[in-house]
Amino acid sequence: MTYVATRSPISDPYARFQQAERMKREGMIENNRIYFNPWETTYEGNPQQILERREAVSLVPLLGALDDNVLPAVQEKFAATYRAAGGMYELTVFEGSKHEWVAKPGSQTDSAREMVKAFIARQLKA
C-alpha cells in the first residue's frame, strides 16, 4: 500500500511562501523563488489548487503534522479539500511547534513518533 506521513506538508506552496514572508525567513523566501521558476508554477503545482481544480490525482492515505512554516488554517483547509475529494487525511496540530521541532527531544516529539508508527502500522495492515 502507498501512503504519506509528513511533518509540515507543503500542501499550498503559495500560502507557505506568504508565511515565510510574514516570519521574515529570507532563506525560505529565496528557496521558493529559485524552486518555482517561473513563479507561475507555484500555482500550477500547488496541491491545494490541484484539488480545487478537480484534477485527476491519486489520493493515498496521508498523515500530517505541523510546524510554524505552515499555518494550521492552511493545512486544515487542505485536509478538508483532500477528504472532500475522497482521500483519507489524518491531521494533527502540535501547538507552539517551531520549524524542525521533531528533531529535538521532548514529549511532543515522542508523541509524534508514536503517531507516525501507529499510522504506518495501520497502512501496512490495510
Image (cartoon, rainbow, N blue to C red):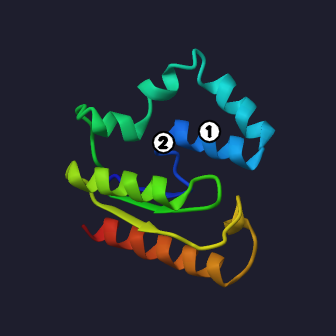
Residue 49 image point, x, y percent: 37, 35
Mark 2 Cα shell of 10 Å, populated few (<14), some (14-19), many (≥20): many
On the image, numbered disc 1 is attached to which residue? 17
Q: In this view, does 69 lie to the left or right of 58?
A: right
Residue sitting at x 27%, y 37%:
57
Q: Amino acid under label 2?
A: Asp
Location of residue 112 by image quarter: bottom right
Q: In which quarter of the image is the N terminus?
A: bottom left
Mark 1 Cα shell of 10 Å, populated few (<14), some (14-19), many (≥20): many
Location of residue 25 by image quarter: top right
State the separation of the CA atoms marked 2 and 1: 9 Å
Residue 75 image point, x, y percent: 46, 55
Residue sitting at x 23%, y 35%:
54
Q: Nearer the viewer, residue 114 or 101?
A: 101
Q: In this view, does 19 lie to the left or right of 72?
A: right
Residue 98 image point, x, y percent: 71, 64
Residue sitting at x 26%, y 56%:
83
Q: Residue 12 carries which label?
A: 2
Q: Which of 98 and 124 is in front in this view?
A: 98
Tell me: residue 76, above or below residue 56. below
Tell me: residue 107, above or below residue 3. below
Please, what secondary structure does the residue beneath circle 2 have? loop
Residue sitting at x 57%, y 81%:
111
Residue 26 image point, x, y percent: 79, 38
